[in-house]
Image (spheres, rainbow, N blue to C red):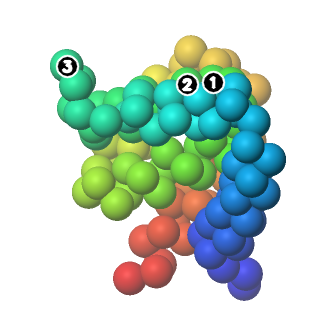
Amino acid sequence: MSDIVAEFNEYRAKMNDKILADNNKIIKRIFNLDTNTYTEGALDVKTKELLGLVASAVLRCDDCIKYHLETSYKLGLTKDQVVEALSVATLVGGTIVIPHLRRAYEFWDALEAQE
């Protein structure tokens, strides 16, 4: 079985480096805004990650879901917490979210298998 976590991270890093190397001010500002959005504020970082995960699932962005799953995992969120957030996303997004839910479960299992 391929290592979907490593493959995702390697591709993401390679392409982010390529994109940022173009030195486009607008794209760099969007990347920076994204980074700063998920820092501690009125909401704690874990809550913000779960919000990002829910929004990503509703918008059906598999790369975004993987990113937020891995960050949530590294922050120490439990599978139960993540699944509860994904249940909200599935309710809000409807049954069209289910294929993304399947891939989210697969990716979370891959994160847990790394230990």
Quadrant in which the C terminus is drawn = bottom left
Query: Where's residue 32, x and y in %?
Result: 52, 35
Query: Where's residue 2, x and y in %?
Result: 73, 81
Q: Are marks 1 and 2 in contact (CB under 8 Å)?
A: yes
Q: Amino acid at mark 3?
A: Ala
Q: Nearer the viewer, residue 28 or 13?
A: 28
Q: Residue at x 29, y 54 (%)?
A: 75
Local packing at callout 3 (Cα closer than 10 Å; few below 14, some 14-19, many 20+) is few
Residue that sits furthest to the top in the current view: 92
Residue at mark 1 to residue at mark 2: CA–CA distance: 5 Å
| Mark 3 / mark 1, whichever is N-terminal | 3
Q: Nearer the viewer, residue 11 or 21?
A: 21
Q: Residue at x 56, y 15 (%)?
A: 92
Q: Would you place residue 58 above or below residue 34 in this image? A: above
Residue beneath disc 2? 55
Q: Amino acid at mark 1?
A: Val
For discs 3 and 2, the disc positioned in front in the rendered view:
3
| Mark 3 / mark 2, whichever is N-terminal | 3
Q: Which corner quadrant of the image does residue 81 belong to? A: top left
Residue beneath disc 3? 42
